[in-house]
Amino acid sequence: MSRTVRTASAAITVALALGISACGSSGGGEAAADSKQTLTVWAMGAEGEKLAEVAKVYEKANPNITVKVTPVGWDVAHQKLVSAAAAGTLPDVAQMGSTYMGEFAELGVLEPVDTKSFDKKDFFPAGWDQGEVDGTAYGVPWYVDTRVLYYRTDLAKKAGVDKAPADWQEMRDLATAYREKAGTKWGLSVQPSGLDTVQSFYPFLFSAGGEIINDKGEAVIDSPAAVSALKEYGTYFDKGLSSKSVPPGYDVVKDFGNGRVPMFFGGPWHVTLLNEGQPQIKGKWAVAPVPAGKSSVSSAGGSSLVISKDSEHKAAATKFVKYLTDAKGQADWYERTKDLPANTAAWDSGKLAGDQNLQVFKKQMDTAKSSPSMAKLTEITDKVDQAIAKVTQGKASAEDALKTAQSEIEGLVKQ
């Protein structure tokens, strides 16, 4: 998903204080899975448009079921979900990004996943983890994404390097060689500051063995591993290998194509953007796993499908979600959207199995790590964004910046 700034859920707080229930079960009034009924479904962004096509196919095979899909823009998705939760009018099924999951699970408006219908072993571990809150699964993984390293192979050869960097030292050496021997403007594009800088930092943090919040719910952003990761991240700015200022709407794909930026961390959609938008470098770039610190670990993103606790169509909703998330449905969804399947069996045949670039993403997903599903996750990561900016702009050491972030995050966790 594209992360958005979440507004405070004041509407829900007021509604609950007034006794307006947004989380009661509909009890015995629920319809059987195959009885005549209408399912309401909200899906965000491009997925909302494509899901309507899938719904028509599903309706033909299930004539008693009408699936009403409402596309919702990511820019308004959070507020729309907040308002619906407060009013008790959430759809039967909704797409939910990982940054929302903790908040809505805490409000009690989501139905726990039926683990008899869905087996976590069918999905990438990080994909399943995104739908879990305090050990209970509320979302079934729909699609996943992760970041891998994109690099210009032609410019690497010009710089005297004929393989992808496998660890931090090799990546730094290649970034330096790109500038000094291949004449590039920068060595690596990583975000210096601003909203969601943490997304750019995650491959360093996780590969160092660090995290923001541990499994016990404790803040650990000032750990030795996290400090090591931020020092490494900051090195690119100290040495002039990465730009300290990136304009709004910056298009790394364009600079990758013209050779100003020879390396960046990107998602699966960048494959299509490069193939279609930068045809002049076809065969001159490749993708590789995130270079290892302690190990090679990237961040996991994507979206899950949730069912409203108030839904009177839980059985039919479960059946529809099953259709969307089994191996066949996931392979079909990839063909329509290029969203990477969360169900690992969907990778065993067809284009997904034969595409070397996509298989790099699969390998990375096997070890990818998801952010904790917490109600205050955006506030927490904002503190990390600020710490990163202090380091990249030369205003604080990694130790001092993360010590401050640790104190601030501890306060948020304890609230």
Image (cartoon, helix red, strand yellow):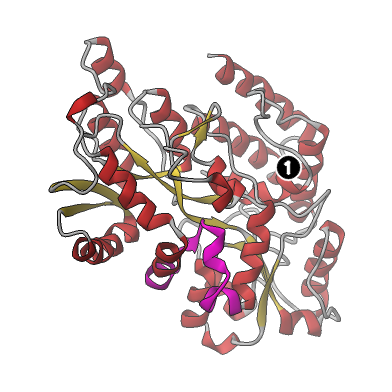
Circle 1 SS class: loop
Reply above or below: 114 against 376: below
> Can residue 302 be seen from the camera position used here?
yes
* Residue furthest top in the image: 18
Q: Position of residue 223 (x, y in %)?
A: 78, 30
Q: Residue at x 59, y 75 (%)?
A: 353
Reply above or below: 16 against 228: above
Reply above or below: 284 against 40: below
Q: Observer-nearest residue: 375 or 410?
A: 375
Q: Quick one: label 1, few (<14), some, or many (20+) residues within 10 Å?
A: some
Instruction: Quadrant for residue 218, please give it.
Output: top right
Reply above or below: 386 against 247: above
Instruction: Quadrant for residue 9, please give it.
Output: top left
Q: Is residue 342 magenta?
A: yes
Q: Residue at x 75, y 59 (%)?
A: 240
Q: Say whether residue 144 is left or right of residue 324.
A: right
Q: Say whether residue 299 is left or right of residue 29.
A: right
Q: Position of residue 126 (x, y in %)?
A: 60, 47
Kindly identify the amino acid type of the residue bearing the numbered disc 1: Gly
Q: Main secondary structure of the magenta part?
A: helix
Question: Which residue is identified by label 1?
Answer: 394
> Can residue 397 be seen from the camera position used here?
no
Q: Position of residue 70 (x, y in %)?
A: 21, 51
Q: Position of residue 271 (x, y in %)?
A: 54, 73
Q: Residue at x 14, y 46 (%)?
A: 37
Q: Residue at x 49, y 39 (%)?
A: 131
- Magenta-drawn segment: 334-354
Q: Is residue 250 magenta?
A: no
